Amino acid sequence: MKTDKKAKKTFVSVAVVVATMVMLVFFASAAYLGDADNDGKVKAGDARTILRHAAKIELISDEACLKLSDVDGNGKIAAADARLALRMASKIDPLVEVPTTENKFGDWTSLNENEHQRVCVNDPSVVETAAHNWDEGKITKEASLWTEGEKIYICKVCGKEKMEIIPRKVSEVNVGDKLYLGSYEKNPIEWVVLEKDENRILVLSRFGIESMDYWKYTKVDTVNWKNCSIRSWLNNEFYYKSFSYDEKKLISETSVKTEIPYQADALYTSDKIFLLSISEAKQYFSTNEERMCLPTFYAVQRGVSTSLLNIDGSPIDSINGEATCSWWLRSCSGNKAAWVNSAGILCYDGSGTGYGGRFVGNYNPLAVRPAMWIDT
Ligand SMILES: [Zn+2]
């Protein structure tokens, strides 16, 4: 008899636990005021329990049961609560459901750039946070060579949006690539990439775009890269006229070191646009042929010095049958600037052989090939 009872009790306990778990999983169990034993029903027995507690005959120790026993919610358990419970048990008064103590969360909302949160509707101090769960993203603006693109990601949980910048395509160019930026005398300027480092590229005009003296004045004192008129023109008139506001922002002002032929010294300038030096003209071109350059039609009109002609009228130095031009380098010493002739030969020493530096003054124009560093 005793064993039977124990077995039955165990069975009931297991059943209650299972039932409670099921209820916890699927829905919050309803709790009613006056339900002193918290079994989900208000019975005469509950009223009696409350009364016994009020009379201190039998104290309720369970926290949840105590809460449910305070039917009028005045913080004390008294005979009045027992009476109210009895009225509910007798269906004189309707049952009053008390809010469950389980957390019932509202919708996820974005908390910050990294996380979203949801707040318990019963207790706002209970907050859950989790990392945003971004979707695969959608490109809303394609990147171009010179402009950044945009990609929008949306959190699959809270709807938060974030934008990612797609780098300019210029960051993908490689040495030897050709690209256009700016225009000179209504013609787009084509550039060749000579060098690429972490966040910028060095470009050189593919063609000789202008015919110009290194030093445009008649009186020649001591001319060098720092004070010459061609540098001033490149960094002022040419720079301002040839590039748009946005294009100018891409051109970085850079510290330029210029060796002085036959001297240990070097000149240091800060330039946006410059000419190549002797060492750069050696470094970036491995053969004379690569160093040969065609002038633009505009530069030819301007009278740029080009290759001498054969007896039959064809140019001695040419690319695809077109006469190549001579072009300035920035290295200068003794009023003679280094240059590259139409055959691509570096001319700065060997005076008297025809391969010496070119006198900077007088009317002595060669082609201009601007060079610059562009931010990627
Ligand atoms: Zn989110």
Image: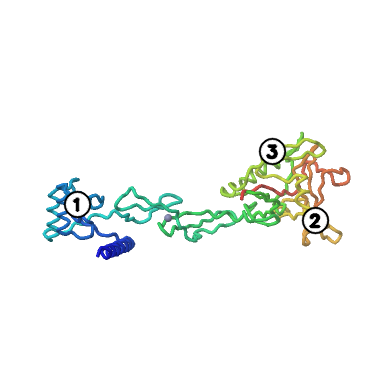
Q: Residue at x 29, y 59 (%)?
A: 28
Q: Residue furthest top?
A: 221
User: Percent x, y for residue 367?
Assistant: 74, 49
Residue placed under numbered mark 1 in the picture: 69
- Amino acid type assigned to the residue bearing label 3 in the image: Thr
Say left or right for 166 vs 233.
left
Closer to the camera: disc 1 or disc 3? 1
How far is disc 3 from disc 2 in space, using C-alphas? 30 Å
* Cβ atoms under marks 1 and 3 closer than 8 Å: no
For this rendering, which residue is in front, 325 or 345? 345
Say left or right for 50 vs 184.
left
- Amino acid type assigned to the residue bearing label 2 in the image: Glu
Q: Residue at x 62, y 47 (%)?
A: 251
Of helix, strand and loop, which one carries label 2?
helix
User: Percent x, y for residue 219?
Assistant: 76, 35
User: Percent x, y for residue 192?
Assistant: 69, 54
Of helix, strand and loop, which one carries label 3?
strand
Say left or right for 123 vs 148.
left
Q: Quadrant of the N terminus?
A: bottom left
Residue 136 position (above or below residue 63): below
For this rendering, which residue is in front, 24 or 322? 24
Residue placed under numbered mark 3 in the picture: 269
Q: Earlier in the sequence, mark 1 or mark 2?
A: 1
For this rendering, which residue is in front, 237 or 300? 237
Q: Quadrant of residue 89?
A: bottom left
Q: Earlier in the sequence, mark 3 or mark 2?
A: 3
